[in-house]
Image (spheres, coloured by chain):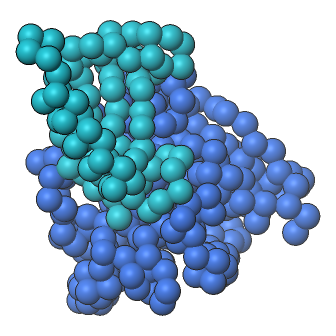
């Protein structure tokens, strides 16, 4: 693995055919590769998540992060766009599913793609990764500390519903990476989700890291926990390596 | 954790954003992850005019202690104003 890659901004079709900006990173050189849809956190389409997107390309995957806030804020800075989305009550789940479907289709259409597509998300994106994996065909999904899957917090928009009821529709193996000190989701909630997935016979691997809370992958935030992040990345590479390699 | 609760306050006044002064129409107040402050969560205030686009925004991210001190300072300043000014 030489970690050579190309990254650029592209336009893609999202929910209901809307044109969206997206950040694409793909490995250089010949050969086939799997694809990964990266779902950004609530702070938006920011530099930190673009860095994560490039990281997937450095490890041999074509990765695409759609800007979920693009419709209302084209050209705005990520933090301004995130604030505008929040002021409007957030992004509807149906729209997120449509945007992720568009991103997956974009990846499948890339020359060299092996047809295997995963999805990963962080924070609110973790919830949306689970949502997408229960709504669309994927080969692997990663939920990094997504809240509002088992219960919805006080003050959430009325349109936001718990997702645990969608568990029977999970289309692929799920890797869950959580912090033992997180309050949303709590370890009790992720344990409840795990039991529910067991009931439906859905393959999943959940890891809860001690000494870590929410957002432990965020290298530019106080929540960063190096031990959990390093081990978490290793688990992602192992998981995607097993499910996204080879021919589709 | 992400929070989803946001207080919306109608606003009359002005704010100075990245491209200069603009009229305010509303303020959003919420506790959530900051974009810049080095804290897990901060009290965030966005002074906005959505009609002028998402960049018509003045943002602050404050520790809870700072936010409470600011709220008290605003109240005490207004209470101490000479009659008829506020």
Q: Is residue A118 left or right of residue B86?
A: right
Disc count in the image?
A: 0
The C terminus of chain A sits in image quarter: bottom right
Q: Colour of chain A?
A: blue
Could you tell me which residue is drawn at 68 percent across and 72 percent down? A245
Write down the quadrant of residue B63 in the picture.
bottom left
Q: Is residue A34 left or right of residue B11?
A: right
Instruction: Give x and y (percent) for residue A16.
Output: 35, 31
Could you tell me which residue is drawn at 30 percent across and 71 percent down? A184
Could you tell me which residue is drawn at 71 percent across and 47 percent down? A25
Q: Nearer the viewer, residue B21 or A248?
A: B21
Chain in cyan colour: B
Q: Is residue B67 left or right of residue A241?
A: left
Instruction: Give x and y (percent) for residue A167.
Output: 26, 73
Q: Nearer the viewer, residue A16 or A215?
A: A215
Q: Is residue A164 left or right of residue A190?
A: left
Could you tell me which residue is drawn at 39 percent across and 58 percent down? B41
Residue A239 seen by the camera = no
Q: Nearer the viewer, residue B10 or B3?
A: B10
Image vertical order of residue A87 relative to residue A173, above or below: above
The N terminus of chain A sits in image quarter: bottom right
């Amino acid at each position: 693995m030489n970690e050579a890659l190309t990254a650029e901004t592209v336009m893609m079709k999202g929910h209901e055919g809307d044109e969206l900006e997206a950040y694409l990173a793909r490995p250089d050189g010949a050969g086939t590769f799997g694809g990964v849809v990266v779902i950004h956190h609530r702070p938006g389409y920011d530099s930190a998540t673009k860095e994560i997107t490039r990281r997937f390309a450095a490890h041999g995957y074509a990765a695409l992060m759609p800007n979920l806030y693009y419709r209302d804020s084209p050209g705005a800075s990520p933090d301004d766009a995130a604030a505008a989305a929040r002021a409007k009550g957030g992004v509807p789940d149906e729209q997120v599913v449509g945007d992720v479907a568009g991103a997956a289709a974009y990846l499948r259409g890339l020359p060299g793609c092996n047809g295997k597509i995963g999805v990963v998300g962080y924070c609110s994106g973790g919830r949306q990764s689970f949502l997408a994996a229960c709504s669309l065909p994927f080969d692997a999904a990663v939920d990094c500390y997504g809240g509002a899957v088992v219960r919805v917090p006080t003050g959430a928009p009325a349109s936001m519903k718990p997702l645990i009821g969608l568990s029977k529709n999970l289309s692929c193996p799920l890797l869950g990476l959580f912090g033992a000190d997180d309050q949303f989701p709590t370890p009790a909630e992720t344990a409840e989700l795990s039991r529910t997935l067991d009931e439906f016979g859905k393959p999943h691997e959940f890891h809860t890291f001690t000494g870590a809370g929410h957002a432990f992958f965020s290298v530019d935030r106080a929540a960063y926990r190096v031990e959990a992040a390093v081990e978490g990345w290793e688990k992602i590479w192992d998981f995607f390596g097993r499910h996204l390699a080879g021919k589709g | 954790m992400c929070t989803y609760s946001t207080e919306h306050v109608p606003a009359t006044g002005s704010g100075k954003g990245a491209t200069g002064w603009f009229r305010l129409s509303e303020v959003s107040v919420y506790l959530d992850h900051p974009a810049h402050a080095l804290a897990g969560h901060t009290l965030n205030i966005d002074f906005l005019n959505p009609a002028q686009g998402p960049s018509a925004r003045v943002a602050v991210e404050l520790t809870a202690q700072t936010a409470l001190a600011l709220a008290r300072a605003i109240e005490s300043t207004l209470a101490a104003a000479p009659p008829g000014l506020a």
